[in-house]
Image: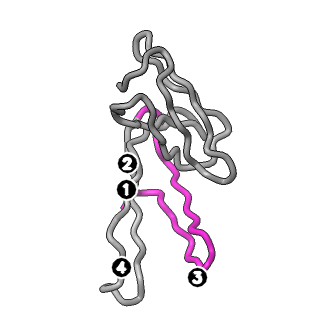
Amino acid sequence: PCPGLSAIQRLPGDGPTCNITGLMPGVELRLSTTEQCIDPLANSPPVYTSWLRLVDKGQWEVFMGPSSNGRKWVDVMSLPQQCVPLQSGKDAFSICYAGGDSPKVSVTRVDVAKGW
């Protein structure tokens, strides 16, 4: 449980809605969600997001981890308006959006044909 987290109860078929407040920029965090049912034996196990760091309102960094082949799909948790790879050294990357309502982007290394 996080202070400042409020979830709105939903009807079957409605999407989940929640609002997280009071987060400070620069702090790394990982969110987990569970579905709680009337019968506690039917509760879901927790599902975790990728590690992220809030940069500013509506802007965050997502840790994507290593890739052995130079390409990786990353869930950025919300339909992105813009994604920018944070450079490490002289490595070069490109970003492609999955399209539609998908919150996923493909990150591809373009300077050499290898992973990171």
Q: Is residue 98 above or below residue 40?
A: above
Q: Secondary structure at mark 3?
A: loop
Frontmost residue, 33 versus 82: 82
The span from disc 1 to disc 4 (Cα, nearest Å) is 15 Å
Q: Residue at x 42, y 20 (%)?
A: 113
Secondary structure of the residue carrying tag 4 is: loop
User: Where does residue 80 sit, x and y in percent of width and height?
Assistant: 63, 42
Residue under label 4: 43
Q: Which residue is mark 3?
A: 12
Closer-to-camera residue (66/86): 66
The mark that comes first in sequence, 1 or 2, is 2
**Amino acid type indicated by mark 2:** Arg
Which quarter of the rendered picture does the C terminus lie within?
A: top left
Residue plotted at (41% across, 17% down): 88
Which region shows up in magenta?
1-26
The answer to whether 17 appears left or right of 48 in the picture is: right
Say if mark 3 contacts mark 1, CB within 8 Å. no
Q: Amino acid at mark 3?
A: Pro
Q: Nearer the viewer, residue 74 or 16?
A: 74
Q: Is most of the magenta stretch helix, strand or loop?
A: loop
80 relative to 94, above or below: below
Q: Earlier in the sequence, mark 2 or mark 4?
A: 2
